[in-house]
Image: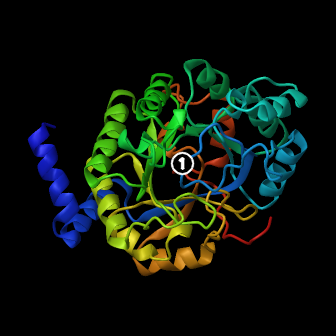
């Protein structure tokens, strides 16, 4: 796309008729995904809440001096995983701060007590533990990764993820949310997207909107994601996540994006991205489910019956029956999926380690979605 057409498209998405934009996005969604809306039933394991980055909007990360800072033990990881298995979860989501051991002596010491010098190696072994001791599929959200780190994690993960968030370099300057955050420099995150594609990893990424980026920068980020997918075919889903104020963050007084802002960004994403990339918006960050459906999403992401959303702890997960009713009212059917999307569940490509792929095949129905479908709150 040339500069002039990109500028024209951005202006239309930002200020054009919203209903027309949403209608176009919904048509693309319906043509590719039909009238099925999906979600993943997961257990959430925050392996460590220490991080070398100090983003202005983050409440997840704790300084190593905080009494709340921790690295989960293998026993704690397994206890959460087994509880998730008991509640019918299919996915074990590992979320963690990025490379705290490179900045903090206390983080290094915590890892050393567990027998490790690098967090990625501990994550790898915890993923293997989940595969050996439970029926779950690990998804690792470890942030920026080197080639070696992807090689270490790939055999024990069904999928991986990292939010691109933004391509705005302005936001790395002093006074902005990514200042002094080495892993949030856009080029580093784009390199991780590219490495994951080169190594054929089913990958989740997305945008965090409302942190100071311009609408044009959002469009630029979407095109960057789509370009990586065009080269490698590995982007399985893109999340459009709205910034939320929290009392204990630097950006506690920063304005949140409006509903219209979210709808415009969701619709623009559906129009820009390849139709086979799933489009997701977090259901616990807005009660306006039907509006999001009208803007073109086809997925609600991971929802847990056993753990809170550690990234947005003030927002409870929606009750699946309520979400199901919202989908039904809008003319959709809600279905549970696996952490890896159906098109990657094939032996014709090399996107998943064969042992993990066999497990996924055993959990999937003929349509590639979860064979067992249960409402949140129902037990085995």
Determine crowd level at label 1: few under 14, some 14-19, many 20+ residues with C-alpha closer than 10 A: some
Residue most extreme to the top: 148
Q: Nearer the viewer, residue 263 or 362?
A: 263
User: Can the viewer see residue 271 in this picture?
Assistant: no
Q: Quadrant of the N terminus?
A: top left
Tell me the residue at 63%/69% (across/down). Answer: 317
- Residue 23, x across and y down, in percent: 24, 67
- Residue 31, x across and y down, in percent: 29, 57
* Disc 1 target residue: 368
Location of residue 96 (image quadrant): top right
Q: Quadrant of the C terminus?
A: bottom right
Location of residue 77 (image quadrant): top right
Tell me the residue at 66%/53% (across/down). Answer: 60
For residue 337, side relative to residue 63 (left or right): left
Above or below, 141 relative to 376: above
Q: Nearer the viewer, residue 250 or 113?
A: 250
User: Can the viewer see residue 376 in this picture?
Assistant: yes
Location of residue 304 (image quadrant): bottom right
Describe the colour scheme in one phrase: rainbow
Residue most extreme to the front: 174
Above or below, 164 relative to 156: below
- Residue 207, x across and y down, in percent: 42, 50
Q: Nearer the viewer, residue 15 or 201?
A: 15
Above or below, 127 relative to 31: above
Element at label 1: loop
- Residue 270, x across and y down, in percent: 31, 54
Tell me the residue at 53%/40% (across/down). Answer: 162
Total numbered circles: 1
């Amino acid at each position: 796309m040339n500069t002039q057409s990109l500028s024209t498209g951005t202006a239309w998405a930002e200020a054009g008729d919203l209903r027309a934009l949403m209608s176009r996005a919904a048509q693309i969604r319906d043509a590719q995904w039909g009238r099925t809306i999906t979600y993943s039933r997961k257990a959430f394991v925050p392996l460590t809440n220490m991080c070398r980055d100090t983003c202005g909007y983050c409440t997840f990360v704790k300084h190593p001096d905080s009494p709340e800072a921790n690295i989960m033990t293998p026993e704690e990881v397994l206890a959460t995983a087994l509880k998730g298995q008991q509640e019918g979860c299919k996915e074990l989501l590992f979320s963690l701060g990025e490379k705290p051991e490179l900045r903090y002596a206390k983080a290094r010491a915590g890892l050393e007590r567990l027998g490790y010098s690098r967090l990625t190696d501990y994550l790898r072994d915890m993923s293997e533990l989940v595969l050996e001791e439970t029926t779950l599929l690990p998804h690792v959200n470890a942030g920026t990764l080197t080639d070696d780190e992807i090689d270490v994690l790939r055999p024990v993960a069904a999928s991986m993820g990292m939010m691109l968030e933004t391509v705005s370099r302005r936001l790395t300057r002093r006074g902005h949310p990514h200042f002094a955050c080495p892993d949030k420099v856009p080029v580093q995150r784009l390199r991780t997207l590219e490495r994951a594609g080169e190594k054929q990893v089913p990958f989740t990424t997305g945008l965090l909107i409302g942190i100071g980026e311009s609408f044009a920068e959002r469009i630029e980020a979407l095109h960057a994601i789509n370009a990586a997918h065009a080269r490698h075919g590995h982007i399985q889903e893109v999340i459009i996540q709205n910034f939320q104020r929290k009392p204990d963050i630097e950006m506690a007084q920063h304005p949140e994006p409006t509903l219209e802002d979210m709808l415009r960004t969701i619709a623009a994403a559906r129009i820009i991205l390849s139709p086979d990339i799933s489009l997701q918006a977090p259901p616990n960050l807005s009660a306006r489910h039907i509006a999001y459906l009208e803007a073109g999403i086809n997925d609600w992401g991971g929802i847990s019956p056993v753990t809170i959303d550690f990234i947005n702890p003030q927002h409870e997960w929606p009750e699946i029956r309520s979400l199901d009713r919202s989908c039904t009212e809008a003319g959709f059917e809600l279905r549970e999926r696996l952490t890896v999307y159906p098109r990657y569940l094939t032996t014709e490509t090399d996107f998943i380690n064969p042992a993990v792929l066999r497990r996924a095949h055993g959990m999937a129905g003929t349509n590639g979605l979860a064979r067992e479908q249960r409402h949140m709150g129902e037990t085995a």
